[in-house]
Image (cartoon, rainbow, N blue to C red):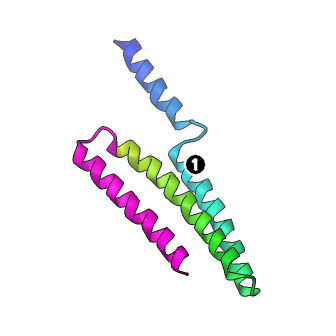
């Protein structure tokens, strides 16, 4: 019995030291997206072509959506089918909300 409590403690403590934990991925994603948005902001202020600025902002948004979509799928995967349908409907609307304005603009 003592061994089982030790093994559960060691497995939970080792998961806290995971190299690519959720908190670390979230932080570095925000840092990368901040850099992309900052470059887009500077280019926009300098009068650089709006298409380049829009592309940088689109890439930043896409990076965040990919990360969030992966994490959301981890949450939805074991749930009933209605959750998966809701996930895909929301994901399609988000993608359309990004792509349609870029096409019209």
Number of numbered callouts drawn? 1
Prevailing secondary structure of the magenta residues? helix
**Who is closer to the viewer here, 17 or 30?**
30
Where's the N terminus, which quadrant?
top left
Q: Is residue 101 magenta?
A: yes
Task: Reply above or below: 62 against 74.
Answer: below
Question: Is 5 rendered above or below residue 89?
Answer: above
Is 67 rendered above or below residue 59? above
Tell me the crowding category of disc 1: few under 14, some 14 to 19, or many 20 or more residues within 10 angstroms, Cα based. few
Q: Residue placed at 55% from the left, 61% from the top? A: 62
Instruction: Please give left or right for residue 12 compared with residue 51 in the image.
Output: left
Task: Pick whichever, 55 or 41, lies toward us.
Answer: 55
Residue 48 at what x, y percent from top left?
Answer: 75, 83
Measuring from the top left, give residue 22's x and y in whole percent: 51, 46
Could you tell me residue 72's position as x and y percent? 40, 50
Q: Find numbered disc 1 in the image and state the secondary structure of the residue it sits on.
A: helix
Residue at figure coordinates x 70%, y 74% from the top left: 52
Q: Quadrant of residue 97?
A: bottom left
Residue for badge 1 = 24
**Residue 28 screen position, x and y as percent:** 62, 54
Is residue 12 shown left or right of residue 39? left
* Residue 70 magenta-highlighted: no
Q: Quadrant of residue 21?
A: top right
Q: Which residues are magenta?
A: 76-104
Q: Residue furthest front?
A: 103
Instruction: Give the residue at x 43% y 67%.
Output: 96
- The quarter of the rendered structure image containing the C terminus is bottom right
Residue shown at 45%/63% (left/top)? 95
């Amino acid at each position: 019995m003592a061994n089982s409590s030790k093994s559960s403690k060691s497995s939970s403590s080792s998961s806290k030291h995971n190299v690519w934990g959720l908190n670390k991925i979230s932080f570095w994603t925000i840092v990368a997206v901040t850099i992309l948005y900052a470059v887009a902001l500077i280019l926009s202020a300098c009068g650089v072509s709006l298409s380049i600025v829009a592309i940088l902002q689109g890439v930043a948004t896409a990076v965040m959506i990919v990360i969030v979509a992966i994490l959301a799928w981890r949450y939805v995967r074991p749930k009933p089918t209605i959750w998966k349908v809701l996930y895909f409907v929301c994901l399609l609307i988000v993608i359309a909300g990004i792509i349609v304005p870029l096409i019209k603009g």
